[in-house]
Amino acid sequence: MEIKRAYRFRFYPTPEQEVILARTFGCARFAYNHMLRIRTDAWFKEQKRIGYHDTSALLTELKKQPETIWLNEVSSVPVQQSLRHLQTAFGNFFAKRAKYPTFKSKHDKQAAEYTSSAFKWDGKTLKLAKMDAPLNIRWSRTLPKAAKLTTATVSKDAAGRYFVSLLCDDSVSAKPVASGQIGIDLGLTHFVILSTGEKITAPNTFRKNESRLAKLQRRLAKKQKGSANRIKAKLKVARLHAKIADTRKDFLHKLSTRLVNENQVIAIESLAVNNMQKNHCLAKSISDAAWSEFVRQLEYKSLWYGRTLIGIDRWYPSSKRCSDCGHTVPKMPLKVRDWVCPECGSIHDRDINAARNILAAGLAVSALGESVNPVCI
């Protein structure tokens, strides 16, 4: 299967490269915000739509103005690409896939996208336009042989770390057929409960760092705005947030990869996470669990490697149904963790029983060839 894959690496710029990147980030952000204001005013004041080609022509005129001639100091490609990103944002908005585009802030994550005409790649080193030396990249993984890079996106996160994401054409092949079949029940105390009886404890990355984060945020709130100490305190908060996100992502990737490698069929319950987060007692733990990201990883990895991922309707009574005889009890409060089937007398662990029912439902749907509800979580 031919796919587009992005490889993300951390790099360490020289002081001169930091200056060039800061200017590039600023120019790209300015062009995006300026054209967003023009398109917004044109629509709400004159009911007139302005598209990408119109903003591109306006950018050309903007570079000739004495007040904004500094836009010519950086590579034109990242600035031009920011207009394409703005067009994509409006397209998603009109297709009702996203909210109305918002202005970019210099205090948030910064990014600039270079196309193949704005960088040089010899298979070992990457050199961006307007730079004299290649980037000092930490090659944590190997790129595919004869990889053809299409874009290189340079970014700087709130913690001050620099990354480059290399998008290239790649191919993936299905893995050998696995004998395993698994049903997955998602939880909070245990992140996933498998139909095999295995329970994997939730990492709770945010919960474990919550008190430390609260202390750093209190210290940040007491610093004077605009001071050097406030900048230092803000950086400490950002670094802890980055540590939490990286730890969570590492856990999700390792677990999803393991399940895809070991099982040919994976059945999982579809959950309405947005509705569940309206419960203020559980909202923080649900967000910390990152169920949506876990299912997203299972989806694309299953597609790549020839596995079958089946989504079970969230209204399916997996917890209330006996996995041995099929009897369904009318009610099953959350506080009930173990129960005895009144029909056959089987003793069930609530979560393991649910995972087994999810697997059985998934296999039934797969065998009968019925339409499978999409995994929307």
Image (cartoon, helix red, strand yellow):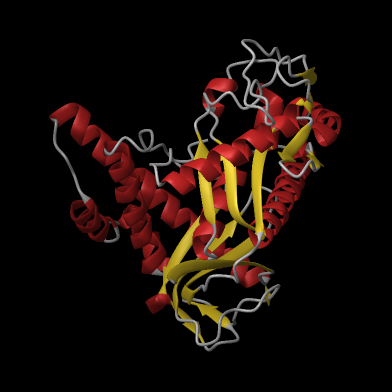
Q: Is residue 374 visible to the viewer in this orientation of the structure?
A: yes
Q: Position of residue 64 (x, y in %)?
A: 26, 61
Q: Position of residue 167 (x, y in %)?
A: 48, 69
In the shown orientation, is residue 53 left or right of residue 222? left
Give the residue drawn at x 56%, y 28%.
273
Query: 97 above or below 367?
Result: above
Give the residue drawn at x 24%, y 33%.
41
In the shown orientation, is residue 203 left or right of residue 62? right
Pick the residue in front: 170 or 68: 170
Give the residue drawn at x 70%, y 17%.
343
Quadrant for the N terminus, please: bottom left
Pick the residue in front: 201 or 46: 201
Q: Position of residue 190 (x, y in %)?
A: 78, 35
Query: 187 above or below 57?
Result: above
Query: 218 above or below 185?
Result: above
Give the residue drawn at x 54%, y 59%.
307
Which image quarter: residue 333? top right
